[in-house]
Amino acid sequence: MEAVATSPFAVIVGGFSGGHAMAYDTYSLLHVRQAGALVTAVIDAPPINVITAALFGELAALAAELEADPTALVFVLKSADPDFFLAHFDVSLLIAMADAPTPPTGDLNTYHAMCARFQRMDKVTIAQIEGRVGGGGAELAMSFDMRFGVAGKTIVNQMEVPIGILPGGTGTQRLPRLVGRARALEIILGAIDLDAETAEKWGWLNRALPANVIDAHVSSLAQRIASFPAEAVRLAKRSVEAAALPLDEGCNIETELFQTLLFSDTAREKMQCFLDLGGQTRDGELRVADLSAEVAQRR
């Protein structure tokens, strides 16, 4: 572990080159499977899924592999432990860093880079959080496109300030963007347990679902998105990402991406299929979500 003492995030993640086929078979703490355009990974790092150097290395390598996989469109991350989704970064590694400090560089550290990769890759990333998530685990989940939890069970906690540090894996930057400045300060400075219902109300979770519903809901949503035209999904995500820019700039990007899709053969075919199946009729529009799924199933 001496190699990580210079930085809590200087974990070896360079073992993945991105140049081989996407087999997703090089992991021991993550169980990864692919079904068409959908990739699912299950975290299995007992006893509580603490982010050790090994687990961080696998998560970072998986992010790189996913990013480079042209066949993947949707990614779901879940846990084998119903009580813990992903805990904080290994505190013993943070202590090792404190014992051998290096001057801060201001560069994007490797944990930040991993989170940014999950956020910006041209795949839809979904976190299925059925138990506790905290510290660096919560920061990673915040970088995903969507987060779903279990009502009465999912708990979010940022435990850094009470142990003398602050969320250093993008948390102080992502959390205010999700829930607002005042609520972010309550979560970070109070180190409170944020329950699923409140997390949903504040915007941290997309939804807080019953325990017997979450798996089916996330699976159905992921498979639905994965069935849609890949380029439309990818460019729609890119366009939403541009919402962080000034409005006029974001709208210009939206226009460019819209036109890119509009003049594609796929869009012409899918739009005509929509009309053929009853789009723009009273009956069709009353069931437009189901009709859209039917369009996706037509090849």
Image (cartoon, grey):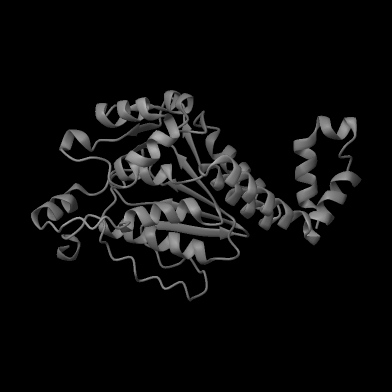
Residue 212 or 111: which is nearer the viewer? 111
Q: Is residue 287 above or below residue 230?
A: above
Q: Nearer the viewer, residue 47 or 259?
A: 259
Q: Residue 240 placed where, x, y %?
A: 58, 45
Q: Position of residue 115 (x, y in %)?
A: 40, 52
Residue at 33% from the left image edge and 61% from the top image edge: 57
Left or right: where does residue 21 sit relative to residue 132?
right
Q: Nearer the viewer, residue 255 or 145?
A: 255
Name the residue at 29% across, 58% down: 107
| Residue 219 pos. (x, y %) | 58, 44
Residue 137 image offset from top left, x and y in percent = 34, 44
Q: Residue at x 29, y 66 (%)?
A: 12
Q: Which quadrant is the N terminus positioned in?
A: bottom left
The answer to whether residue 94 is seen in the rendering is yes
The single residue placed furthest to the front in the displayed view is 248
Q: In the rendered image, which quarter contains the C terminus?
A: bottom right
69 is higher (above) or lower (below) than 132: below
**Residue 294 placement, left or right of 180:** right
Q: Is residue 114 left or right of residue 163?
A: right
Report which quarter residue 179 is drawn in: top left
Q: Is residue 82 visible?
A: no
Up the image or down, 277 lies above or below 207; here it is below
Task: Name the residue rendered at 63%, 53% in the picture.
Answer: 235
* Residue 104 in the figure: left or right of residue 84: left
